Amino acid sequence: MSDTTYGFDTLQIHAGARPDPATGSRQTPIYQTTAYVFRDADHAAALFNLQEVGFIYSRLTNPTVAVLQERIATLEGGVGAVCCSSGHAAQIMALFPLMGPGKNIVASTRLYGGTVTQFSHTIKRFGWECKFVDFDDLDAVKDAIDDNTRAVFGEAIANPGGYIMDVRAIADIADAAEIPLIIDNTTATPFLVRPIEHGATLVVHSTTKYLTGNGTVTGGCVVDSGKFDWSANDKFPSLSQPEPAYHGLKFHETFGNLAFTFHGIAIGLRDLGMTMNPQAAHYTLMGTETLSLRMERHVENAKKIAEWLEKDDRIEKVTYAGLKSSPYYDRVAKVCPKGAGALFTVSVKGGYDACVKLVNALEIFSHVANLGDARSLVIHSASTTHRQLSPEQQEAAGAGQNVVRLSIGTEDADDLIADLDQALSKASA
């Protein structure tokens, strides 16, 4: 596309995509291939030396995946992106160039349960640590950062409660400490929140969710803002110091604002191997084409349903930030003026047993461990996605025993309300 500034609705369809030069195919083909023929020996050597950009092997780069990377980076306002096999893979890919044994990250307590588990246990095997802090307490965030902290991590709209993070306030703290802010934008999508505009350094996605929007494939993505100075100090040697595997090449010196992106491909995908397959990229590309249309309907439905639930005597609490009663309501206009998303939790009177009855009685809502589908979804987080956490961690994450998580889809809102009504009647009988 030309240098013309296009709107979101145009970019979600066209960014990164061009008619196939071989066939003229308008839709991006699925390049189902392992490897690519080099023009000659010099061409191969230039690619392997990172002297020329091109396709080598599909663990590293693939034309279908490359289109998706460019599209997501464009929608997020970044300079580049690296797609990978899942949202969890994207988190490790984002941290990998930053961390080292004995280093730590500061993360929000309001995170997806699987992320809490990954940060609490799995990353310790790399010698990394995580400090969990309430990101509404800015002083606590500042105090948690020490000389070994290499990143701050949070979710723009947190899963499961739909809590909205003050991205700019946390970004200012990270900037003062000269460390990057990583924002998981899965629940919000770039249609509702563009974290880079609020000061984020890196943005991660589980593309499995809203970006694909149809519950067909898993995937992840790391978007690079291109705005961080990796050579400002000695905290990030992977990006600022000579890389032995490339004869002493310095990624930041050589690639400038694309240093993180090139490192993610040349080192991250090369050695970690968490590659997105071209079929998954194809499905996600098709999903992005309707992202804004879907998100508008998701938000419209979520607001209507949350307002109905809040007035129901069988419900103790609704966490939707789009409600005036929410402590995060004032942040909607500041952080996500197009809407507070479509994910929130409901505290059901009757506790654990009532939640189980509710989930079992729903007919339109699907009981699955996913979110961001065009279909409405429900899950009891404490017994599933947040099961590995302690009761204290569950409460901090907004996933207590009496809580169910709703991911509101794009169906008829009145039909969804009727389904919830009949299920609540059975749950409270």
Image (cartoon, rainbow, N blue to C red):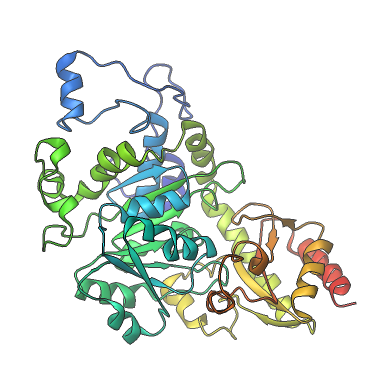
> Which residue sits at x=56%, y=74%?
390
Above or below for 102 versus 374: below
* Residue 127 seen in the current view: yes
How far across and down, in percent of the image, does residue 72 sit?
40, 47
How far across and down, in percent of the image, does residue 286 sit?
53, 39
Q: Residue furthest top?
A: 40
Of residues 5 and 322, the one nearer the viewer is 322
Of residues 61 and 149, the one nearer the viewer is 149
How far across and down, in percent of the image, does residue 199 sit?
29, 67
> Which residue sits at x=48%, y=29%?
27
Of residues 279 and 416, the one nearer the viewer is 279
Q: How many marks?
A: 0
Q: Quadrant of the C terminus?
A: bottom right
**Quadrant in the picture for residue 33:** top left
How far across and down, in percent of the image, does residue 331 sit?
45, 79
**Quadrant in the picture for residue 274:** top left
Of residues 315 and 396, the one nearer the viewer is 396
**Quadrant in the picture for residue 101:** bottom left
Above or below for 121 versus 74: below
* Residue 77 seen in the current view: no
Report the side of 28 relative to 74 (left or right): right
> Which residue sits at x=32%, y=78%?
169
Above or below for 12 versus 280: below
Q: Quadrant of the N terminus?
A: top left
Report the side of 239 relative to 143 (left or right): left
> Which residue sits at x=55%, y=76%?
321
